[in-house]
Image (cartoon, grey):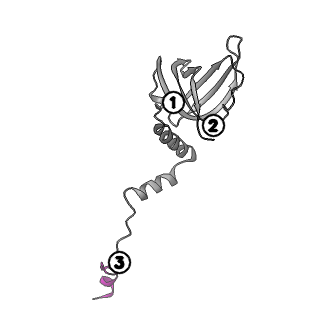
Amino acid sequence: MDEVSARTSPETDPAPPERGKGGLRRFLRRMASSKAELEAEELQKTSGDEGATPITACSARKRHCVAGTLRTVTLRPRGGAPALEAELYDGTDVINLVWLGRRRIAGIDPGRRLRAEGLVSVQDGRKVMFNPRYELRGGS
């Protein structure tokens, strides 16, 4: 056997190790994705595990259960009365949660995971849920 055929024979050039279905593809996708994309993907997965509806699938004038992470929490007066507003992000979209007549709610802080249920409405093109029932989830 000559030198060239010896280098390319199956006995001397074993096949690369198997990595499992999609393992390499998943690794490469994670390496090429931005941090925000990876966080969004993780939020979508955990929200789905909690039985929540993705925010993008929420329609106006229907009750929905949503889950995600609070991005911002602000105090904004509405009609002269205080209102606590929080922006909830689940990896697909954002919904504003508004508690009328409240200045502060213990545990409602940016970065906190939350599950909320209520009637979704649309104001100025943004999804809003007024006075939702909520459940604080594991830490930030």
Give the SS element for disc 1: strand
Q: Tell which circle, 1 or 3, labels the residue nearer the N-terminal end.
A: 3
- Residue denoted by label 3: 13
Give the mark nearest the N terminus, 1 or 2: 1
| Secondary structure type for disc 2 | loop
Question: Looking at the picture, which amino acid does disc 1 mark?
Answer: Val
Q: Quadrant of residue 106?
A: top right
Residue bearing the label numbered 2: 112
Mark 3 or mark 2, which is nearer to you?
2
Residue shown at the point (51%, 30%) measured from the top left: 66
Residue 66's disc is 1
Please provide the residue range marked out in magenta. 1-13
Q: Is residue 66 left or right of residue 5?
A: right
Q: Nearer the viewer, residue 72 or 5?
A: 72
Residue 125, percent from left and from top: 53, 20
Give the amino acid type for the residue marked by disc 2 in the picture: Arg
Does the magenta run of residues contain 2? yes
**At 72% across and 22% down in the image, what residue appears?**
103
> Is there a contact, CB below 8 Å, between mark 3 and mark 2?
no
